[in-house]
Image: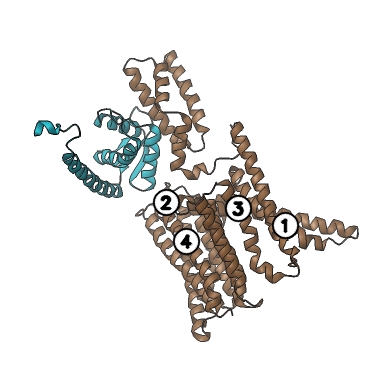
Chain colours: A brown, B cyan
Amino acid sequence: MTGTDTELEAQIAEWRSYMLRRKAISEADVDELEDHLRERVGDLTESGLKSDEAFLIAVKRMGRMDELSREFAREHSDRLWKQLVLDPDRDAAAEAERRRGLLVMLACAALGVVAVKLPALFGYGFDGSGDFYGRNLGLLVLAPLAAYFAWRRRLGAGAIGAVAGLFALGAVANNAYPLDADSQSIVLSAIHLPLLLWFVVGVAYAGGEWRSGQRRMDFIRFTGEWFIYLVLIGLGGGVLTAFTVGVFGAIGVDAEVFISEWLMPCGLAAAIVVAAWLVEAKQSVIENMAPVLTRVFTPLFAVTLVAVLVAIGVTTNAIDVERDMLILFDLLLAVVLGLVLYSISARDAAAKPGVFDWMQLALVVSALLIDVLVLVAILGRITEWGFTPNKSAALGENLVLFVNLAWTAWLYVAIIRRRKRFAVLENWQTGYMPVYAAWAAVVVLVFPPLFAFA
Amino acid sequence: MHIAKDLVAASATPLVLGILAEEESYGYAILKEISDRSGGRLEWTEGLLYPLLHRLERLGHVESSWRTPEGGRRRKYYAITEEGLRELAEQRKQWAAVTDALQDVWKATRALAPVAPPALEA
């Protein structure tokens, strides 16, 4: 080995470490590019250049690093999204951008607090008007979040109009329908409107590019991470609340009104925006946690569902489809779908099928069987008692989930048998997302008039 | 001769798939092949080639594998898949349609080089 060779190795090693700092370029990509670089250096040396000259030219030919990194980022947006706002080699511009993001977050969180407390000025106190807040809480807390993303993503006028229009539509329909406080429809609206609006937030999150499958997948990732942050903030808030009650109780001051009127509603409204900001700002802190959680809970949920199926088979007890039970089973299926979606979003699409995919398949198939049993029970109730808003909504939800789970199971089998690429499953899931939004819209907008506001 | 960016981008996929349809290859060799085939007129950057290869892999048109040839370095090889062959056939049809139309248009507009000027033909 000659001196120039060691020199070249040192230069390549340095080049490598520079490349590895780019978050859009993975280590395997750097390996691939290094091979490319060495090949070109080899060719250039053969044509008579010295190795250090050859290295310079080869690096120059590869193009500027930020341009190369940008091209990689366009293809691998899943890596780009991991790019920290708090980038370690940040410069002044990034610092200003970070500060701006922080200010926008604070402004939108404040907006959320105002939105939640403003109705109190018009006589809709948080304690006295449960009906009003039941209808509108989702609207009030999600609108600032949509505003936050509209601001951060520099949404175009058309997209802003669409998002604002959808929020307005939800607000009008939800409040203009003459629904009784104890009607089934009002409970359904209270559940489905936030769901619908969450997808509208997704449009803002995607910067208007809601048709793009990759943006949708990013939104699924975001939803999972956001939920984890919200739960963490909620836990912290619970501890704070307990201390507040205890400490003020000890000195003879009743803090309950302050907590129920101010601390909890304002905390929730602010936490929704803060959690979204945290997801974007502190991405790499938590990204190791969400995939771990899905890895832990996928097998556990699969075992639980199989146990339920075995219990049903052994006792031959049918599923009791009272209202609470319906909600419980819908929630269970939604959680399963969430697990599946999340592990799909966290899985490397190029990885070969493995044990975990079998686990997923078991989870999906058992959820599918339970879904069928619930569907049978609901149909039985409907033929016996006729359609009600609750049963129709449950029927629709289970059908929507059934179609998704059935096709997911089919695709999983094909993937495990290596007939299909994993990306097909990703496309199916992202392509299916509008169906949930559409169904939520039907329940919120069409159901009340259809069932005479029952 | 400089070839416009749009044209380079549009022809990138069929070129890569076409080269891989002959035999499996790796990044640097593909780049050289493209330069040779176009007489040096198509100069691709790495920023174009590798993200494109990764996209084709994600779409299932090519498959990659890391291998170490004897006495060589570890290297990432790309091979075309069944799906990639179908895509190539489809692209080929589309390109044939485009070039046919262009040929037709070139014939009609005689004023343009490299066809002989109309004065000579009259």
The kind of residue on which mark 4 rests is Pro
Residue A222 pos. (x, y %): 56, 51
Is residue A407 rendered to the left or right of residue A20? left
Same chain for the residues under marks 4 and 3 in the image: yes
- Side of A302 relative to A234 (left or right): left
Tag 2 secondary structure: loop
Q: Nearer the viewer, residue B15 or A204?
A: A204
**Residue beneath disc 2:** A353
Q: Please check whether the numbered discs 4 and 1 fall on a single chain.
A: yes
Considering only order in the chain, which callout, 3 or 4, is on the residue closer to the N terminus?
Answer: 3
Q: Name the residue carrying label 3.
A: A147
Q: Amino acid at mark 2?
A: Pro
List the residue tagged with mark 4. A434
Looking at the image, do the residues carrying marks 1 and 2 touch, with CB atoms under 8 Å apart? no
Residue A404: x and y in percent read: 45, 64
Vertical side of B43 occupied by A426: above or below: below
Q: Secondary structure at mark 3?
A: helix
- The image quadrant of residue A260 is bottom right
- Please state which of residues A383 and A409 is positioned toward the viewer in this rendering: A383
Left or right? Give the position of B33 relative to A315.
left
Q: Measured along the vertical axis of the image, is residue A68 above or below residue B81?
A: above
Residue matched to label 1: A266
Looking at the rendered image, the disc whose residue lies closer to the viewer, 3 or 2, is: 3
Residue A287 can be seen in this image = no
**Earlier-in-chain disc, 4 versus 2:** 2
Marks 4 and 3, how far apart in space? 21 Å
